[in-house]
Image (tube, rainbow, N blue to C red):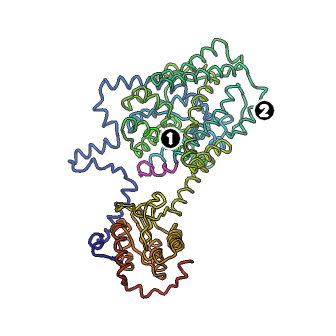
């Protein structure tokens, strides 16, 4: 079933040396973006300079920095500082931490990111989801009310674990692990988290002094309604007014994007107005609780506070690992989304290193987990930032706040912080995207809802694991049940396409062309064998005549990226089963990796090199020739002793 034409075109070169193949595989796995291309064909001194700039991006853009760029970064930095102060206090309270820790976390980490980060637009800060996740996991082994010092030390230790893990993932080029948090998972997780965070803020809205430490919807609602005796109408009215104001500013921003600064300044205005009201009317006497004392001064060192007691270490590692992955997925996705708007690229692995280093340094300087929050980054982008210098500006103004203004925020009402958090969370529930998933891909919708409902009804880590597990199950199903299709010839062309997608594609009498679209290996080899044999049986049944009988099966392998020994043995077995029924098998266009395996395993000798074709058209043309001039194509065909019954097994 071969031809000189095919033999002249199909490349049967000897397999590449193992070392070369290994280098190629490692490069595609760990360096798909080819980061070292800039070092080629350059002098050693230039290569060293570029290498330093690659690992420390500030050295690349700082020499080109000018005053015109600084004007934009200064405006952006001041704007995000106004958002960082209320968010820092709010998210620290959400994580059951002292409010001052939230302010500390907007001082040191932004400086570290400005040095090592590759995104021009990312604004560093704390995030609600990770704050609540930390509180949920660490709160199981240490109570923030009964032993706040131990709780804080464990949170700082979890931040160190997060930083070490993120740095290691970046240096080892293991960003592929973050890819397992799919877009659907992140949407569902953030939406479910937003729901439970909003419900938890009812404590602040109603001025409750007691509350549940659990995060699921049932427990939170039960706590709210069982503590009706603690409800304070003054606090509730204040909270509703603040919430309406914040939502109105978001409405203005959505109607006119140029008014982004109104929405960005609104949380700060809420805090200032809340402080004035609480101070002037003695809010604590009317059921309006405040943040409490905030001391002046920048971040104190906390390396001595790290706690590696084996009794708490499992919970600390769990909190650090889970929040680290969530923070990476969120921060990198946000950085890339804003870079795309400017036709720029963000190196995910360098971002991992930057996030890791800022969390390591942060854990040594009284900061808890930070990443790139969407709201702050969006404000930074819309304010016209040009470089990461906007993070430096924010850090400088945050330092001034800590040194001189921190005590003024002691009067911040908790109800104001609850309103700020609820307003921010409303934007995290992506109703339109969830509906879009439902319309486009029902399985993606199920993955999203698994995260959403799991987080809302069970717990954050369980919901996340459920969604990731469902996504992995889907990936396994794709691998174990790969796509196959029958090809037909498009009229008046040499093209062969899926007959289901192109009903006008013509069948070639006596020849069935099957396209395989995935690697062939142990997990799917049995399915591939049974599917191919079923194609042949169906063809025989559909065309029960001499012209309809299948004499040749061509396997188009251009979509098969790799094959293992089980896959090779499966192809041998398929060939023997087909030969037992007088059906000959040919291979079309195997890729280099597949061809090397076939040559090394001597499969090419088993099937015959003359039965391997460069294109479907070559194979079909030769099959037609053989239909008119029958002849043996492989001496080993005479030795086939399998019965025709095996084709139907």
Category of crowding for the residue at label 2, using alpha-carbon neighbours closer than 10 angstroms: few (below 14), some (14–19), many (at least 20): few
Residue 404 falls left or right of residue 75: right
| Position of 347 relative to 590 (above/below) | above
Q: Main secondary structure of the magenta part?
A: helix
- Residue 180, magenta (yes or no): yes
Category of crowding for the residue at label 1, using alpha-carbon neighbours closer than 10 angstroms: few (below 14), some (14–19), many (at least 20): many
Near-viewer residue (153 or 320)? 320
Q: Quadrant of residue 206?
A: top right
Residue, x 51% and y 19% (percent of image)? 405
Query: Looking at the image, can residue 118 be seen?
Result: yes
| Position of 436 relative to 512 (above/below) | above
Q: Secondary structure at mark 2?
A: helix
Image mark for residue 458: none
| Residue that protrudes farthest toward the top in the picture | 280
- Quadrant in the picture for the N terminus: bottom left
According to the picture, the residue beneath numbered tag 2 turns out to be 226
What stretch of residues is rendered in magenta?
A: 168-181
- Residue 443 is situated, as x and y percent measured from the top left of the image, at 58, 51
Residue, x 57% and y 27% (percent of image)? 89
Query: Looking at the image, can residue 161 be seen?
Result: no
Q: Secondary structure at mark 1?
A: helix
Q: Give the mark nearest the N terminus, 2 or 1.
A: 2
- Residue 297 is situated, as x and y percent measured from the top left of the image, at 50, 24
Residue 137 falls left or right of residue 506: right
Tally of marks: 2
| Residue that protrudes farthest toward the left in the picture | 43
Image mark for residue 330: 1
Residue, x 40% and y 28% (percent of image)? 390
- Residue 170 is situated, as x and y percent measured from the top left of the image, at 42, 48
């Amino acid at each position: 079933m071969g031809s000189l034409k095919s033999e002249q075109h199909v490349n049967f070169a000897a397999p590449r040396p193992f070392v070369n193949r290994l280098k190629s595989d490692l490069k595609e796995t760990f360096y798909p973006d080819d980061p070292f291309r800039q070092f080629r064909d350059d002098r050693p001194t230039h290569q060293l300079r570029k290498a330093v700039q690659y690992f420390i991006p500030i050295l690349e853009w700082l020499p080109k920095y000018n005053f015109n760029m600084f004007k934009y970064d200064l405006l952006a930095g001041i704007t995000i500082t106004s958002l960082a102060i209320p968010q820092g206090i709010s998210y620290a309270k959400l994580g059951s931490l002292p409010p001052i820790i939230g302010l500390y976390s907007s001082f040191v980490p932004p400086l570290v990111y400005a040095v090592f980060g590759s995104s021009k637009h990312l604004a560093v800060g704390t995030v609600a989801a990770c704050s609540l996740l930390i509180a949920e996991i660490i709160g199981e082994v240490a109570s923030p009310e009964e032993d706040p010092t131990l709780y804080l030390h464990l949170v700082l230790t979890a931040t160190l674990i997060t930083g070490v893990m993120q740095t290691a993932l970046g240096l080892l080029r293991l960003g592929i692990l973050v890819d397992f948090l799919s877009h659907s998972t992140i949407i569902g997780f953030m939406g479910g988290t937003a729901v439970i965070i909003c419900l938890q803020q009812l404590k602040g809205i109603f001025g409750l002094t007691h509350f549940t430490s659990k995060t699921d919807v049932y427990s939170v609602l039960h706590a709210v309604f069982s503590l009706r005796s603690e409800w304070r109408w003054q606090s509730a009215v204040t909270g509703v007014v603040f919430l309406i104001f914040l939502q109105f500013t978001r409405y203005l921003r959505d109607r006119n994007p140029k008014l982004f600064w109104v929405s960005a300044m609104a949380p700060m205005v809420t805090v200032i107005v809340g402080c004035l009201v609480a101070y002037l009317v003695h809010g604590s006497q009317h059921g309006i609780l405040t943040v409490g004392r905030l001391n002046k001064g920048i971040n104190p060192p906390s390396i001595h506070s790290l706690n590696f007691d084996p009794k708490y270490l499992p919970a600390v590692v769990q909190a650090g690992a889970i929040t680290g992955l969530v923070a990476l997925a969120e921060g990198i996705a946000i950085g890339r989304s804003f870079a795309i708007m400017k036709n720029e690229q963000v190196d995910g692995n360098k971002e991992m290193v930057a996030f890791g280093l800022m969390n390591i340094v942060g854990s040594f300087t009284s900061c808890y987990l930070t990443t790139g929050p969407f709201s702050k980054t969006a404000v930074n982008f819309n304010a016209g930032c040009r470089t990461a210098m906007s993070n430096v500006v924010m850090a400088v103004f945050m330092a001034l706040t800590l040194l001189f203004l921190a005590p003024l925020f002691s009067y911040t009402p908790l109800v104001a912080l609850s309103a700020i958090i609820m307003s921010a969370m409303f934007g995290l529930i992506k109703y339109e995207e969830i509906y879009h998933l439902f319309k486009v891909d029902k399985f993606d919708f199920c993955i999203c809802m698994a995260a959403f409902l799991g987080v809302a009804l069970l717990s954050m880590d369980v919901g996340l694991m459920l969604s990731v597990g469902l996504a992995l199950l889907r990936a396994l199903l794709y691998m174990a049940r790969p796509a196959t299709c029958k090809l037909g010839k498009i009229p008046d062309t040499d093209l062969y396409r899926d007959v289901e997608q192109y009903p006008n594609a013509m069948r070639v009498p006596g020849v069935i062309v099957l396209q395989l679209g995935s690697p062939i290996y142990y997990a799917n080899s049995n399915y591939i064998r049974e599917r191919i044999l079923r194609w042949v049986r169906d063809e025989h049944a559909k065309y029960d005549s001499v012209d309809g009988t299948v004499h040749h099966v061509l396997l188009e392998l251009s979509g098969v990226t790799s094959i293992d020994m089980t896959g090779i043995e499966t192809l041998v077995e398929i060939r023997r089963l087909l030969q037992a029924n007088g059906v000959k098998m040919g291979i079309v266009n195997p890729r280099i990796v597949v061809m090397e395996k076939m040559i090394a395993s001597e499969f090419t000798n088993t099937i015959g090199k003359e039965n391997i074709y460069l294109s479907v058209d070559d194979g079909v043309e030769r099959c037609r020739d053989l239909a008119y001039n029958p002849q043996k194509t492989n001496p080993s065909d005479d030795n086939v002793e399998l019965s025709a019954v095996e084709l139907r097994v």
